[in-house]
Image: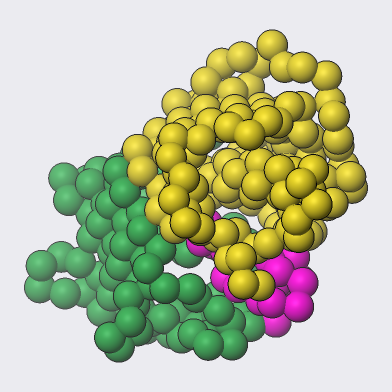
Amino acid sequence: MLVKEFYRIDSKEVQEDGSVVYGVSLNTTHDVYKGHFPERPITPGVCNIQMIKELAEDASGRSLTLSEIDRCRLTAMVTPDGSPSLNIKVKIDDNTRLTATIYNGDTTYMTLSGTVIDRIS
Amino acid sequence: MSASVMYSGDQIKTFIPQREPMLMVDKLFACDEANVETGLTVSPANIFVYDGGLFSEAGVIEHIAQSAALFAGYNDWINHRPIVLGYIAEIKKFSLAAPAHVGDSLVSRLSVVSQAMNITLMNAVTTINNQTVATCKMKIFMDKKK
């Protein structure tokens, strides 16, 4: 995990179509919320993207770079108070095509489609 | 080439609501009604830096998003309007051409593609030493009822 102790993985289920669904809990007292934003904690969209990448790494067993995002839509706001538990579904096709959704029940927070490659450092 | 620095460091906090450890712009080079040029020097303490010094693409994207916030906030400030919170609504066609690292100075140029209601679509190009490292289109939602 890059941003230390930002979240915790509670569950992991591999689906028949090869996608993997994770249950995660946000660390609601993380320092990130001191700056995003003071007096109004909102989970930064890029932290959602970073979680997706790290779970894609867990699912694939590879270190990855998210080299392209075709489209990433933030359809509902993730907040540590309002949505501390999230489901994150990731699927990698042909070792490189990533699709991911962050949701909980009927609420979809983020959808992302993009390209991952072995991490370039 | 970049113009000289208009504002840097803590001065940037006049224009955007983000604070440490989520502050991902540290220079404003130029800004008008349709364009902005910003900078970020990646410090070792940046929360998006991996062991070994790689700056995560998430950090690059947040730098671009906060460049859009700086564009909006600077224009609000010179027009005596309050600074509002802005959120990423959508990212399209992001492409990472080269990785950034600790010590690199990112320079981002954003221009308005379209503006409607509280949504601004901007085109972004981020460079290091005049080499393109990332490009994208980003829709920012400005929460004007803050």
Residue A43 painted magenta:
yes
Is residue B71 rendered to the left or right of residue B45? left
Q: Chain A is shown in which shade? A: green
Where is residue B11? Give x, y as percent: 89, 45
Q: Residue furthest right?
A: B10
* Residue A61 sits in quarter: bottom left
Q: Which residue lies furthest to the left in this view?
A: A16
Is residue B44 rendered to the left or right of residue A80? right
Where is residue B79? Give x, y as percent: 76, 46
Q: Residue at x 61, y 65 (%)?
A: B144
Q: Residue furthest front?
A: B79
Q: Is residue B61 visible?
A: yes
Q: Residue at x 63, y 83 (%)?
A: A28
Q: From the rendered image, report the letter of the chain displayed in yellow.
A: B
* Residue A80 sits in quarter: bottom right
Q: Can residue B46 be seen in this view?
A: no
Q: Which residue is drawn at 70% across and 31% down?
A: B31
* Residue A34 sits in quarter: bottom right
Residues drawn in magenta = A29-47
